[in-house]
Image: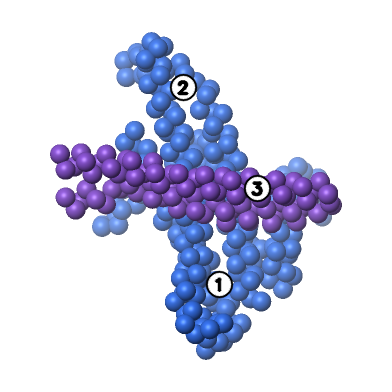
Chain colours: A blue, B purple
Amino acid sequence: MNDIGNGPKVVFEIGKIQVTETVVIGWLIIVAVTILCLWLTRGLKKVPEKKRQVLAEMFVNFVNNTVKETMGPSMMHFAPYIGTLLIYAVLGALVSLIGLRSMTADINVTATWALMTFALITFYKVKHNGPLGYVKSFGQPVAFIFPLNIISEIATPASMAFRLFGNVAGGMVITGLLYGALGALSSAVGLSFEAGSFGFNVFQVGIPAVLSVYFDLFSGCIQAYIFSMLTMVNVGAANE
Amino acid sequence: MGKAIVLGCSAIGAGLAMIAGIGPGIGEGYAVGKTIEAIARQPEAKGDCTRTMFIGVAMAESTGIYAFVVALILLFANPFIGQL
């Protein structure tokens, strides 16, 4: 029970900097994506012959079309960033399927991404309105609403960070609680066997996998999509 | 004794905080129902409807997520224990 809600473990330390599980898993995902990209784009032909080229084109087309429809054709240079965010968030959530800790179940990761979005929003607002116009826009429509506008400006990245973190961490906690409850149920009915250090509980077979399909597969992909979608909508709105 | 009371009250508080899950549940169900009505009336607008619905549902979910974060803090990173 106690290890469910704790943060990621510290793997090793460099001086005083603690390198956690999350960071190491992030590195693994970066390596995996690099290898995947190299493999998918090897020997490209004008008319695709191999299945992997069709797959790569499908993903690139999907990202390009989504960016074009949400942000407009003038913001197409955002497509690589959005694609990176999408594939990193999806793999960061799906990594729990092979028994590692989800990367996005760490508030530091999601808060970093939300801060990046916040920086982009502020940059485009300043670029569009000018520095003075940006400060003035907080006093719209009346001057005394200034503090409220600042709160709503900060609420955007905060809610984005908490949303992604909360969904993935919530799925992790619920699956962990269910796993513990099924173990307790098995030993209460007497269907729990132990051989040395290896324990086996009958009810723990199969049942958590059903929940895992929703919380890991479905929720992970949908939340990653929503995060990149909100990034596109917010940055696109800042440039209008 | 004091620690036991704080721990027990924190657990009750976490449970109470998660009552907020009712709101997003109702709201999201309503949004999805309306989207299905819209798609049934105009099937060619399915892509737009679905995309807008996902953003709206994600917005509606925020309050539930805030409650969940509060519950998590109360259960696993209790700030009141340190004040004893």
* Of the image marks 2 and 1, the number of the one nearer the N terminus: 1
Distance of mark 2 from mark 1, alpha carbons?
46 Å
- Frontmost of labels 3 and 2 is 3
Between A195 and A156, the residue placed more toward the observer is A156
Image location (x, y in percent) of residue A132 = 52, 89
Residue B68 in the figure: left or right of residue A31: left
Residue A143 in the figure: left or right of residue A194: right
Viewport quadrant of the N terminus of chain B = top left
Q: Name the secondary structure under disc 1.
A: helix
Q: Disc 2 marks which residue?
A: A204
Can residue B60 be seen by looking at this rendering? yes
What residue type is disc 3 on? Tyr
Read off the chain for label 2: A
What residue type is disc 2 on? Gln
Determine which of the numbered discs, if any, sits on residue B30 in the image: 3
Distance of mark 3 from mark 2, alpha carbons?
35 Å
Distance of mark 3 from mark 1, alpha carbons?
31 Å
- Frontmost of labels 3 and 1 is 3
Image location (x, y in percent) of residue A183 = 40, 22
Can residue A9 be seen by looking at this rendering? no
Determine which of the numbered discs, if any, sits on residue A121 in the image: 1
